[in-house]
Image (cartoon, grey):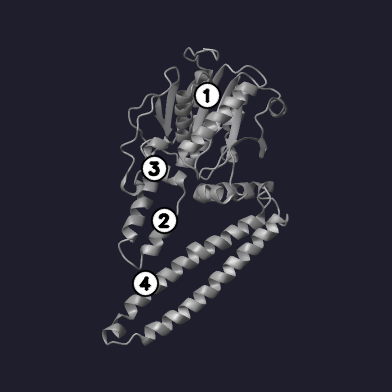
Amino acid sequence: MTSTARTTDVAALALEYGDRVVLGTVRDVHTAVAHRVFGATRIVGSRVPEAIHDAVAGTVYGSLSRALRASGTAARSMAAHGVGAPVDGSRVGRQVRSAVNGLVGDELRLMGDPQAITMSLRRDGTDIAATPWKLRQAYPDATGHLVVLVHGLCENDESWLRRGPSATYAERIAADTEATTVLLRYNTGLDVSENGQHLDELLEQVVANWPVAVHRITLVGHSMGGLVVRAATNRATVAGHLWPHRVGDVVCLGTPHAGANLEKAAHLGSRVLGFWPRSTPFGTILDSRSAGIVDLRHGYISADEWEGQDLTARWGMDRIAAAPLPHAEYHFVAAGPVGPAARSEYLPSAHHFALLNHPRVGDWLVAWINAKPRQVRSLGS
């Protein structure tokens, strides 16, 4: 199998999930309904009609399943031989790949599927290796103040570049500050704690190999990205890494620190659907969510909060406290009223995804970046 994700890989994945999830759900619902319908014949002592029905249904569903699996295998073989356009060759393809990673990214990584995204710096829709030469090439006008934008669930680096009348945050930062914007892409289907580890390791490399000395870092996370940022600073502090000493500001845009209500509702829905045989298959679909989505439900940022625990009975109210960086300013922005957290702001007329490119948020970012930071420790201390 090639390391390049191709459209044939996407087709194979669709066929595989069509077999396992869609066809499987239809089959299970059909079985549950048939079991109820044939209850009357069982009462009178005849199981013949039910046996005939089950045999016919089994043959039909078995044939469809074999056809889907065979088609999926053929598509995988074609991808392995280089057939199919690279998924990352278009913006739409990159968006689809990011969305799929958000939904089943942990499974993609486990299967070794080339569609699984590896965290990387991004510029102009391509990966940038965090090596001295590659960084000098990608950032010829690099400054010592990095503004790292970390996207949320099912998003990617281009999510910050949504079309609209206002300038993007990267454009505002370039025009109105002396900082350099750094974008990245990652597999949002992985546990937040694992992505925090990847971000910690990546920033350690970036700071060590950046074209000029890094004297300040501003971390900006949208939605899940804010949890990943907190997981990275928490992990780096415990590991004794140096880059957190340069963090002057942490900005969380619509981050569900106490857990996402929508994901809690989906979890509750799956539990309710599981009470009835005919609706249980639909609950199974809702339960087929990535580890990253489960973390979003709870707001977890550390593996210690979920390893060995039954997350189906927990709602994220027993999280382990993670101390903020003592020298950093924390800013919280929400698309609606927020609690009395420090540096909290809200945009009552904006929706969640508007926080990716909102003129008011751009003004706040510029102001926070240009503000004099607290005293930070030197890299050698």
Residue with the mark numbered 1: 218
Marks 4/2 in contact by CB < 8 Å: the verdict is no
Which circle's residue, 1 or 3, is located before the other in the chain? 1
Could you tell me how far apart the alpha carbons at marks 1 and 3 are, in whole angstroms? 24 Å
How would you rate the neighbour count of disc 3 (Cα within 10 Å): few for under 14, some for 14-19, many for 20 or more?
A: many
Which circle's residue, 4 or 3, is located before the other in the chain? 4
Q: Secondary structure at mark 1?
A: strand
- State which mark lies toward you, 4 or 3: 4
Answer with left or right where residue 138 lies relative to residue 367: right
Could you tell me how far apart the alpha carbons at marks 2 and 3 are, in whole angstroms? 15 Å
Label at residue 32 = 4
Label at residue 48 = none
Marks 2/1 in contact by CB < 8 Å: the verdict is no
Closest to the observer, 47 or 288: 47
Q: For residue 252, say whether it is visible.
A: no
Residue with the mark numbered 2: 286
Residue with the mark numbered 3: 260
- State which mark lies toward you, 4 or 1: 4
How would you rate the neighbour count of disc 4 (Cα within 10 Å): few for under 14, some for 14-19, many for 20 or more?
A: some
Mark 1 belongs to which amino acid? Answer: Thr
Mark 3 belongs to which amino acid? Answer: Ala
Could you tell me how far apart the alpha carbons at marks 4 and 3 are, in whole angstroms? 33 Å
Q: Quadrant of residue 126?
A: top right
